[in-house]
Image (cartoon, grey):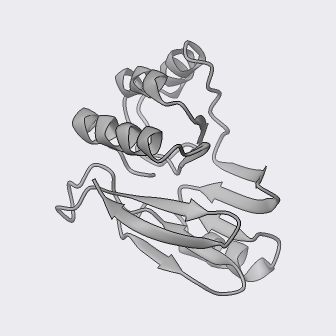
Amino acid sequence: MSDTHDRLDAVDKAIELFNMEKVEHVLHAGDLVSPFVAPRFSKLKAKLHYVWGNNEGDREFTTVKFAEIGVKPLGNFAALGLGGRKIALLHGTHEAIVKALVESGSFDVVVRGHNHRAQIHEGKTLLVNPGETCGYLTGRSTVALLDLTTLKGKIIEI
């Protein structure tokens, strides 16, 4: 998921979907925006991996609010090992960096947000942009589900 932009009802719907689907890991590619959103993730049964976006407000207080539910923001970039796969997680503010990560061959999957465009691009490295959970720019509140065994993903409207 990405780009929640304080939209609490969409965050709740996404968490409900992830719990229903028995998702083990949720990757959030940034732009939570305000600290008051962080406690909503206490209902999430999966492990949350979170990186900063470019619209974060008070990062220090957001870190405190996440710590209350056992989540530690991972900074601007995270290299994760999940399900035997190497995953790059970033907001994606700079297109050249996203492109370089995809073309580097260092990752099986690159998960990004920022441009609010839901897309899954298959190639040697799978590029996943879950779109905007908030639905503000496109009118569609979306997340992505990814099977790490098959490396098949799908965009889900919530």
Can you tell which quarter of the image residue 130 is in? bottom left
Considering only vertical position in the picture, is 32 above or below 131?
above
- Residue ranking furthest to the left: 139
Considering only vertical position in the picture, is 39 above or below 12?
above
Residue 32 in view of the camera = no
Q: Position of residue 38 (x, y in %)?
A: 44, 26
Which residue is located at x 56 percent, y 63 percent? 146
Considering only vertical position in the picture, is 121 above or below 60?
below
Which residue is located at x 51 percent, y 28 percent? 59
Q: Is residue 158 left or right of residue 85?
A: left
Can you tell which quarter of the image residue 144 is in? bottom left
Q: Position of residue 137 (x, y in %)?
A: 21, 61
Which residue is located at x 45 percent, y 69 percent? 154
Which residue is located at x 55 percent, y 43 percent? 52
Q: Nearer the viewer, residue 60 or 150?
A: 150
Q: Position of residue 5 (x, y in %)?
A: 32, 42
Q: Is residue 148 left or right of residue 94?
A: right
Q: Is residue 135 left or right of residue 118?
A: left
Considering only vertical position in the picture, is 18 above or below 108?
above
Q: Position of residue 155 (x, y in %)?
A: 40, 67
Residue 120 in view of the camera = yes
Q: How many marks?
A: 0
